[in-house]
Each structure stands twice: as C-alpha cells, then as structure tokens.
Amino acid sequence: MFRWITQHSRRIAALAIGTAALALVACTPEVNVATPGNAESTGIAVTGTGTTSVKPDLALVNLGIEATATTVAEARSKGATAMDALTKAVKAKGLADADIQTQSFNIFPQYGTSVTPLPNSRPTPPVIIGYTVSNTVQLRVRNLDALSDVIDAAIAAGGNAIRVNSFQFTIEKPDQYLAKAREEAVLNAKARAEILAKAAGVKVGPARSITESGASLGALDKAVAAPAPLAADGRVSTPVSPGQENLAVVVSVVFEITK
C-alpha cells in the first residue's frame, strides 16, 4: 500500500512539474535567435547624394490689399474695390482664375486716444479709432516672361493699398527632372562603398537594397537681376530673374561584400 502511494505521488509530482513547465513556456515572451554571420546583417551601407539644376517655370507671388477707415463697412468697401482692380489687372496680363487664390481675409481695429492728455495727467485708455481690412492673394505666374508686367500691373491697380508679402520661384513638376539626380545619387553611393571596401581589403558586390530618403528643392542660386525692360509708356519695369533651382536626391544603399 505504501509503495502504491509513493509511485502515485511520484506520478502526480511529475505531472505537476510538467504542467509548471508548460505554464512557464506559455508565459515566456517569444525569443528569436539570429544565427551569427547571417548574410542579411553583412554588407556595406552608405548614402549617396545627387543634384541637378533646373530653371524655374513657376513664380508664386503673394500680394495683399490693406484699407483703413473709420467704420468696418467703409474699410471693407475700399479694400474690395482695390482687390477687384488688382484681380482684373492681372487677368488682363494672362492669369487664369485658377491661378489666383485668396490666402487670408482679416478685419482688425485700430487703437488710439480720443483726446490729447494734459501734462501730468493720467493716460486715457485706448479707444478704437478705425478699422483695417487685409486681403491677401497668391498669384501663380506660369509665363515668367510676363512676370514683370504682372507685378507692375498689380501694383498700379492696388495703389497705396498694395502690399507685396512674398515672392518665390519654384518648379511645378520637379519629378520629371529628378531622374538624373537619382542616377547620380546611386553612383555617388557606389563610389563611397568602393573606397570603404578597398580600405577593408574586400570588393563591392551588387546592391542588396536601395532606399530614397527624399527629394528636395534647394535654395535658388542668387543671380543678378536681368536688365529691366521698358514698359509701353517708357517706364522701367520691375526687374526679376528666375536663376536656377537646385534639386537634390539622397539614397541609402546596402552593397554586398565579395572577396
């Protein structure tokens, strides 16, 4: 009877140990063991850069109209009249409706003092003495040969209410020019890899992976403005020069190592 109990107890103990082991395995996070020398972890990882210069084909001109009056209604009317004249003027120079986009419209008060304070008197609190209407638009000028005329027409139409906020040359569809830069970036990466391989006494094999980090538009080359053309009435037009736009591509390449 004692022997049976002992054997039975051993079986129960073994079963308990096995169950505990299963429970331990179930609660243990999955562990992945990588074999040393895995081909995927070897290679020469380098970056390469390629650039190309392109003449811009688009100008973004941000213009504003500001009008101030004693009432909101009067300020709005003055601003609307000036902006309407500006819009008609640039359309007459060839801009389409789709290339004229409103960027912002604001009305804000102007503060001042109602009376002139007497000497040694306490300052009076500011009061609203008028209102200013601000309306900004962005012009997309695709014909750069007409850019000077567009700017001058807008300034003339806006009069003293005109504000020139920003001006930028860019490329409307840069992807069509990036093929050369991408090719140059890969060649640049391979040249770097060959220098490293030579120093390590190995050779560069085929590329295992190529990742493009991104393409970017660089700053414009600062070129001297072109000679200002004469307007129809003999006045000198506003001189502009598009210069060159720098396009850059960066790639990350992993090359295999061969003996």
Image (spheres, rainbow, N blue to C red):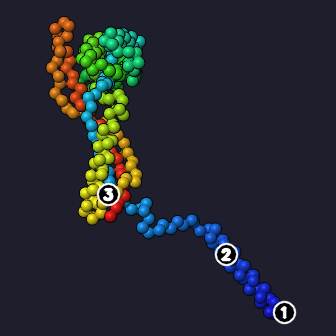
Judged from the image, the secondary structure of the residue bearing numbered disc 3 is: strand
Secondary structure at numbered mark 2: helix
Q: In this view, does 224 lie to the left or right of 32?
A: left
Q: Which quadrant would residue 81 be assigned to in this image?
A: top left
Q: Which residue is at a point 36% across and 34% down the rendered structure image?
A: 175
* CA gap, disc 3 and disc 2: 52 Å
Task: Name the residue tied to disc 1.
Answer: 1
Q: Give the camera-side residue of 185 and 217.
A: 185
* Residue 142 can be seen, yes or no: yes
* Residue 74 placement (x, y as % from top left): 38, 11
Q: Residues within 10 Å of mark 1 (few under 14, many from 20)?
A: few
Q: What element carries label 1?
A: loop
**Earlier along the polypeptide chain: callout 1 or callout 2?**
1
- The quadrant in which the N terminus is found is bottom right
Which residue matches tag 3?
204
Q: Is residue 52 above or below residue 44?
A: above
Residue 220 sits above or below residue 94 on the image: below
Q: Which residue lies under the disc numbered 2?
A: 20
Q: Which amino acid does label 3 sit on?
A: Val
Residue found at the very far front of the displayed protein: 259
